[in-house]
Image: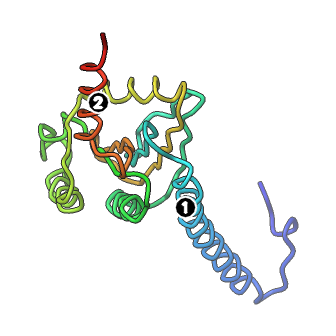
Amino acid sequence: MLTKAYFPVASGDHPMRRAFFLLTLLVTTFTAHANAQSDWKAKLNTELPLLGHRNWILIVDSAYPLQVSPGVETIDTNDGMIEVVQTVLRQIDNSIHVRPDIFMDAELPYVSEDDVPGVSVYRRNIADALHDYQIQPQLHDKLISQIAETGQSFHVLVLKTRLTIPYSSVFIRLNCKYWPTDAETRLRAKMSAAKP
């Protein structure tokens, strides 16, 4: 047990030291939070120009597993899901080279408010955040397996949020902005037709 002899304090000085300690703790906590926020945003700014077709960016809930495929990099944003989704999509939309193909867990519409209070509000908020995009539902386990496989050859950036709602993650597969899907289809058709 620590005694007063271990931390000698002049009489009457005790409350000031305690206030100073609490203030230092608050400043340190705030600084750590601000650094986490700026770190993930800086990482996104640095990596996005390097990412392209077949790379992924995931914005995930707190319990998303830490994957060990060599190309999967996980960062704790210490931010809310909606803010991170909006920031990432804004960066992608402002890029000259990539566009998002968005996948979400097929289980999310079936999670009940009784089991997870707040899930209905989250569904509304994420629908608002993604209203300009087509969402492709896929089973959670299939998405995780796909990310594990992709991480063997391609980079995957996982941005972990504070959200504690299951099946809420947003999986963004990057595609080429200046080469639309219909152009790729026409190209493949021409190549098939040209084969002897």
**Picture disc at residue 138:** none
Q: Earlier in the sequence, mark 1 or mark 2?
A: 1
Helix, strand or loop at mark 2: helix
Front residue of 28 and 20: 28
Which circle, 1 or 2, is nearer the viewer? 1
Residue 153: image quadrant is: top right
Q: Say above or below: 168 vs 7.
A: above
Residue 87 x, y percent position in the rendering: 40, 64
Residue 35 x, y percent position in the rendering: 61, 66
Residue that extends furthest to the bottom in the rendered view of this protein: 12
**Which residue matches tag 1?**
45
Which residue is located at x 41 percent, y 38 percent?
Answer: 64
Which residue is located at x 41 percent, y 54 percent?
Answer: 162
In the image, taking residue 18 as reference, residue 87 lies left or right, namely: left
Q: Name the amino acid, label 1.
A: Asn
Q: Quarter of the image for the N terminus: give it.
A: bottom right
Residue 52 x, y percent position in the rendering: 47, 45
In the image, taking residue 21 as reference, residue 89 lies left or right, namely: left
In the image, taking residue 61 as reference, residue 26 lies left or right, namely: right
Residue 165 x, y percent position in the rendering: 28, 46
| C-alpha distance separating marks 1 and 2 | 28 Å
Q: Callout 1 environment at 10 Å: few (<14), some (14 to 19), or many (20+)?
A: some
Residue 145: image quadrant is: top left
Which residue is located at x 33 percent, y 30 percent?
Answer: 143
Q: Name the amino acid, label 2.
A: His
Q: Say above or below: 165 vs 39.
A: above
1 and 2 marks in contact (CB < 8 Å) = no
* Number of numbered discs: 2
**Which residue matches tag 2?**
140
